[in-house]
Amino acid sequence: MGDELPRDELKAIWQGQPTGTSTMTMTLIRSKARDLQAKTRRQLLGTVAVPIAAALLYAFGIREFPALEHVLHPLCAFTLAWSLVGLYFLNRGMWSTVMPGDAGLSTGLEFCRGEIERRRYLLRRVLLWSLGPVLLAIGTFILALAMIGTTDRGLFPNGLPFLALVAVWILGYFVMRAREQRELKRELDELIDLEKDHSR
């Protein structure tokens, strides 16, 4: 059988295979680690917008509805304080270090898994510490509009487009969170597949 490779040549190919596979796997893991870190950082930077939005709504509400200061001051102050406390709890311990360049395969997989856990932690807590203050700020604004409305020019029906927009935004927010959950599960499954391929 002239087409068969000599045994020594086959042995050389076989011995050379794991190193190439391992190098490729490490490249994939480093790339995944960078992607995961970038996503986590973007999400963390996005949490800064909540206290800013709460402060702007506070200032706008007090300026536009001076007659309702007794109602708006406590609600807006609580919303702002809640969003600032939330910013602290969402960011505490979340800024990870860069994966070392000389990290081995198992260290790289652990690093990626840690990044996925960070994102899951952030996703679980964002409802309480980020969405909660936003909803309270919107609710306070709607309450102010309802309280100043007269019988012929009240919140309804003039405010219906705004209320519909808020409802669509809330629905979109939960759809995005569900999509992120699916994405995290997919990324975790990819890591498990990489780990299985390496252990073979």
Image (spheres, rainbow, N blue to C red):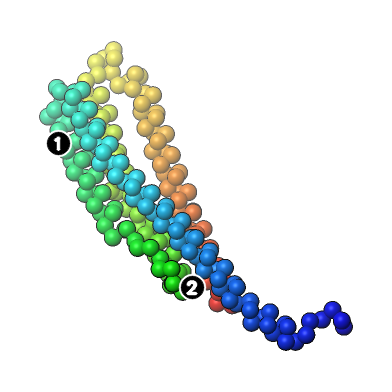
Q: Is residue 181 visible?
A: yes
Provide the residue designation for mark 2.
105
* Residue 127 seen by the camera: no
Q: Quadrant of the C terminus?
A: bottom right
Residue 92, by quadrant, is bottom left
Foreground tag (2 vs 1): 2
**105 relative position to 151: left or right:** right
Q: Residue furthest right?
A: 1
Give the residue drawn at x 51%, y 58%: 186
Point out which mark residue 50 bears.
none
Q: Quadrant of residue 79?
A: top left
The residue to which callout 1 is attached is 74
Nearer-the-camera pick, 8 or 86: 8
Looking at numbered disc 1 in the image, what kind of residue is underneath it? Pro
Does residue 159 sit above or below 121 in this rendering? above
Which residue extends farthest top?
152
Q: Position of residue 163 (x, y in %)?
A: 36, 28
Q: Position of residue 89 (x, y in %)?
A: 25, 54
**Gap between marks 2 and 1, in whole Å?**
53 Å
Classify 143 as above or below 171.
above
Locate residue 17 relative to residue 77 in the image: left or right: right
> Eyeballing the image, is 90 above or below 54?
below
Residue 126, percent from left and from top: 33, 49
Identify the residue shown where x is 82% and y is 81%: 4
Location of residue 50 by image quarter: top left
Decide which of tag 2 and tag 1 comes sooner along the chain: 1
Under circle 1, the secondary element is: helix
Furthest residue in direction left, as rendered: 70
Q: Residue at x 48, y 64 (%)?
A: 30
